[in-house]
Amino acid sequence: MSRRQDRIEGRGASRVVDGNRVCGVHTLAADGSGVNGVRALPIVGVLVVGVLVVGIPPGMATGQDWPQWRGPERDGRATEFDAPSAWPETLEEHWSVEVGTGYATPLVVGDTLFAFARQGEEEVLLALDPGTGEVRRRSAYPAPFDMSPATARHGPGPKATPAFAEGRIFVHGMTGSVSAFDADSGERLWHVPGTDVEPLYHTSMSPLVVDDAVIVHVGGHDDGALTAFDVASGEVVWSWDGDGPAYGSAMRFRLDGADQVVAFTQEHFVGVEADSGALLWIRPFETPSTTSSQTPLLHGDLVIQNGRDNGVTAFRALRRDDAWATDDVWHTREASFHMANPVVWNGVLFGLSHLRRGQYVGIDLETGEVLWSSDPRQAENAAMAVAGDFILSLQEDAELVVFEASRDGLRELRRYEVADSATWAQPAWSGQRIFVKDVSRITLWTVGP
């Protein structure tokens, strides 16, 4: 029995009522049947192009765009998610549609939802109606590849979330390719194929757009380059080839007056000049089995460095005469983050440490003091966001956990079942809408006022 089956069946979270299975917060037909690949809901709806739709109530907030990895600022802050003052017992499921495999977060851009996924031997970019799940447009390109046995558990990808900017969508494919699409028409504008060398566990860095360049660490193990491509043409603007890629995503920080692209690489943590790619500073940084998977964080002028079995370190990057230096401010080994990226709330770093088989922790970002830690064995992974005074944690077992944040700990308010398969992808938060990507489906949930 799988962990998910054990959790749903063994702990009594599932029961059959009048022929329907009630699982936490949603009701499904007991036989799991659906229509045209879209799971049918046992409530009254309107059938639109094969999608059974539960209409979104008039006046429900649709909210901000969610245009890239971890949201508008790439930091997990859902600033315009309309969180209720009291969380309801259930979320409302509006539609669920098959889109293909992968861990890419759906993008919310105006009145369009974009999904980047794999269907057979192709990688596809789908444009959907966010209110109904109807697929408006499909763009695709061939993307055959041989999956490493070490990654078989996580499927054939893609694992990188696209980025939207100025009418274009940029995607980083599983074989290392980089492509740009016109967001309105779906036309592929340019395509840079991957190299013969891939990362050990395939690609997962989500593109970063900086002015007129889109930045991706291309190449593979021991042979890669952090590269800026012209957004209009795909031509290389600059590249830094000092290390192979890691699995986290780059950030744009302004440090000591300099605009920088900051990223974990195969064996280092680096800051390069955003305009030229010139190396400004570099720190050795290695993780067991070469698995660095974190996205850098900035708190004030403190850069937060973390990764598997490395603890957490805060440092400052500073100019000294004609050179750059990094000075450590604090370090703790009481917590360590692997694939789960933490979030910041009121000067506290909240995250799921991989130590003790998954433990929520809170760290004071000024001092490095671990303020509290939860019981162990909470989850293997958590896609975390912060909305007001709530910490939202989508665990890999399809449970969305809502916590009330404080310096003293996390008070659990609600748990919701939001999928029927594993949920490793970050969800998209917009208004009162939550777009959840599981192994192969996207589901729209809403939360009332």
Image (tube, rainbow, N blue to C red):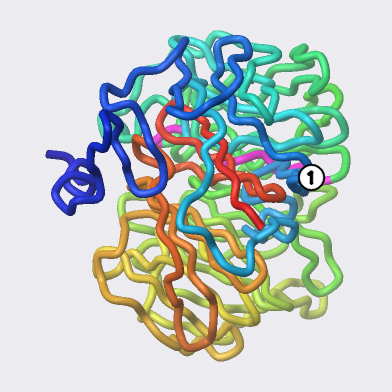
Q: Residue at x 40, y 17 (%)?
A: 34
Q: Is residue 94 visible?
A: yes
Where residue 349 sits, quadrant-wise, is: bottom right
- Residue 265, position in %: x, y? 53, 51
Vertically, is 210 above or below 190? below
Outermost front residue: 18
| Amino acid residing under circle 1 | Gly
The answer to which of 191 and 297 lies nearer the viewer is 297
- Residue 363, position in %: x, y? 49, 82
Vertically, is 411 above or below 262? below
From the viewer's perspective, tell me whether residue 35 is left or right of residue 235: left
Query: Which residue is tagged 1?
Result: 59
- Residue 101, position in %: x, y? 44, 25
Vertically, is 366 above or below 345? below
Q: Residue at x 53, y 86 (%)?
A: 407
From the viewer's perspective, tell me whether residue 37 is left or right of residue 141: left
Quadrant where the C terminus sits is bottom right
Q: Is residue 239 visible?
A: no
From the viewer's perspective, tell me whether residue 161 is left or right of residue 341: right
- Asked if the magenta segment contains residue 44, the reply would be no
Secondary structure mostly seen in magenta is loop
Magenta segment, which residues?
Answer: 200-210
- Residue 372, position in %: x, y? 40, 85
Q: Residue at x 49, y 45 (%)?
A: 247
Q: Residue at x 81, y 46 (%)?
A: 210
Quadrant where the N terminus sits is top left
Vertically, is 94 above or below 398? above
The answer to which of 372 and 143 lies nearer the viewer is 372
The answer to which of 241 and 23 lies nearer the viewer is 23
Secondary structure beneath disc 1?
A: loop
